[in-house]
Amino acid sequence: MSTHQSYLDRMTTRLNELEHEVRALADKVARDGDALQQRELRELEAGLAVAREQLQASRRAAVEVSDEMTQSVTQSFARVQTALGRARAATA
């Protein structure tokens, strides 16, 4: 398995875990959240969708995956992870 393929597999797993965490937060916000938290959650979900699309595009590129593509996926993932941390703190 190539290094890039291994990276894509790891990021898929991490993104699935992150998506699960976002869903759990969405359930909490739906019960207890205010309008600001709901807006932040929508932005978080949008960021997650962008990261998912970038990962899928990288997977479709297969052999042609560049370091720039993997860096872009990693940065998108990091932004969503940071936003999730902020959202969690706001709902705590």
Image: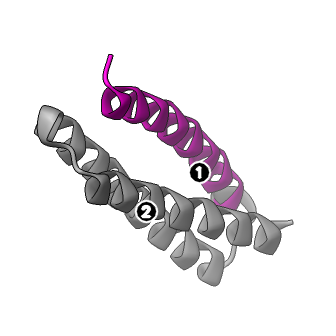
Q: Magenta span has 9?
A: yes
- If you read the primary sequence from the N terminus, does the residue marked by circle 1 or circle 2 appear first? 1
| Image coordinates for residue 22, horizontal then vertical, percent | 59, 51
Query: Which one is nearer the viewer's eye here, 24 or 76?
Result: 76
Identify residue for label 1.
22
Left or right position of 63 against 33: left
Which residue corresponds to the image point at 53% horizontal and 68% vertical from the top-left?
A: 79
Dominant SS of magenta comes to: helix
| Image coordinates for residue 29, horizontal then vertical, percent | 67, 62
Q: Secondary structure at mark 1?
A: helix
Name the image colouring.
one colour
Which residue corresponds to the image point at 22% horizontal and 36% vertical from the top-left?
A: 59
Amino acid type indicated by mark 2: Ser
Q: Residues within 10 Å of mark 2 (few under 14, many from 20)?
A: many
Query: Which one is nearer the viewer's eye here, 1 or 33?
Result: 1
User: Is 84 above or below relative to 63?
Assistant: below
Identify residue for label 2.
76
Q: Residue furthest right?
A: 92
User: Is 20 above or below relative to 3?
Assistant: below
Which residue corresponds to the image point at 22% horizontal and 44% vertical from the top-left?
A: 58
**Which quadrant is the N terminus positioned in?**
top left
Left or right position of 58 against 21: left
Q: Residues within 10 Å of mark 1 (few under 14, many from 20)?
A: many
Left or right position of 8 against 11: left
Query: Residue 81, which numbered label?
Result: none
**Which quadrant is the C terminus positioned in?**
bottom right
Which residue corresponds to the image point at 46% horizontal and 72% vertical from the top-left?
A: 43
Region rendered in magenta: 1-29
Q: Quadrant of residue 62?
A: top left
Q: Quadrant of residue 41?
A: bottom right
Amino acid type indicated by mark 1: Val
